[in-house]
Amino acid sequence: MKTFIQVTEIWTPSEDGSLLEFHSGLYGPHKAFGGITRMMCFGFDEGLPGKAWAERHPIVLKDLQNSYFRRGEAAAKAGLTCGVAIPLFDGETLKAVLVFFCGDDSEHVGAIEVWHNDPAKDIELGLADGYYGRAESFEVVSKRTRFQKGYGLPGLVWETGLPVVMADLGMSQRFLRRDEAKRVGINKGLGLPVGSVPGHQYIMAFLSALGTPIARRFEVWAATPEGDALSFHSGDCDSVPDFAAGMAGVRIAAGAGPIGQAMATKTPVLLGNFAEAEGPLAGAAQAGLGALVAIPIIDGGLTRAVACLYF
């Protein structure tokens, strides 16, 4: 099964903080694109990672050929048509820029959205940008939709400050675009609080379709009150529909495995091989999942949660 996200990269600041250097990547069949990438670095406001660093909020770039994107020819050869860059800050310190690349519009249905609120101008979230593959009608509806705090997937993330997993979107009364989601086949979503522009709210929404899911499993791990571990909070999996029930009460110590490392370092972690996986990841391996990105949610200098996407 093809996933909507084809490539995932992590870029981290150089030792002197002047550049973004390649940290790690998951490229699947796009090895030539990965080979070119590993030799690159980006300055402040340079290329897609550098632009996200400078803007301090997520960026969706839908033109990889005629823009500031520096790997246009390689992206075209790989069939990559859109890039999404998410800067992760700890206060004023940039920890990393997480970059996703999506595939050809003609084969993909789903959405990666950025919702934004500027309190000086509005009391609601509006769509700042998004990529929808061939779900054009869902894009039209989304541009006309706004969310108050606590309503819809972006509004629930805004209210809680935590990642939110929402399944059965076409049937959920909490998902305000459920009718159009059901029509185009979008069936589940993950929302993340992101962005570090003071006073502004930025929410990422990853909306997954049956044929080309954003990812094959979503998990949310919340920090324990003591702050020394994560406990399983919620999740959804294509291949094991009831897996979340069996994860109740599972904990991961800070620093343990890739998910615990994301908590302890406040930096995203990629894992592309589950061959020797232990603990919760052993179950992911048994479900046929083969790659993971763990994304820390940082607030007030602490990791409040870790959101995981499995491919």
Image: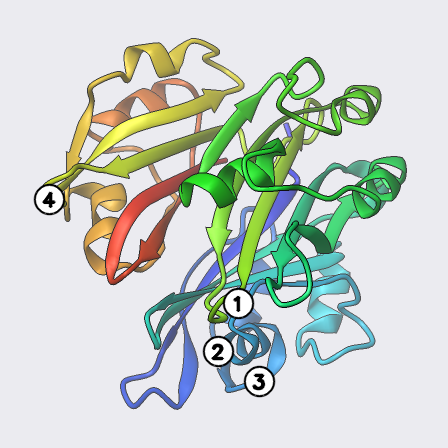
Q: Are marks 4 and 1 in contact (CB under 8 Å)?
A: no
The x and y percentages for residue 144 are 84, 44
Distance in Å between CA atoms under marks 4 and 3: 35 Å
The amino acid at mark 4 is Asp
**For the residue labelled by badge 4, is the local secondary structure a helix, a strand or a loop?**
loop
Q: Earlier in the sequence, mark 4 or mark 3?
A: 3
Q: Which residue is mark 4?
A: 228
* Between discs 3 and 2, the one toward the N terminus: 2
User: Is disc 1 surrounded by few (<14), some (14 to 19) or many (20+) residues within 10 Å?
Assistant: few
> x, y percentage for residue 58?
58, 63
**Residue, disc 2:** 39
**Image quadrant assignment for residue 67:** bottom right
| Badge 2 amino acid | Met
Q: Dot 3 surroundings within 10 Å: few (below 14), some, or many (20 or more)?
A: some
Which residue does the numbered mark 1 point to in the structure image? 35
Mark 4 and 3 residues: CB-CB less than 8 Å, in contact? no
**Which mark identifies residue 176?**
none
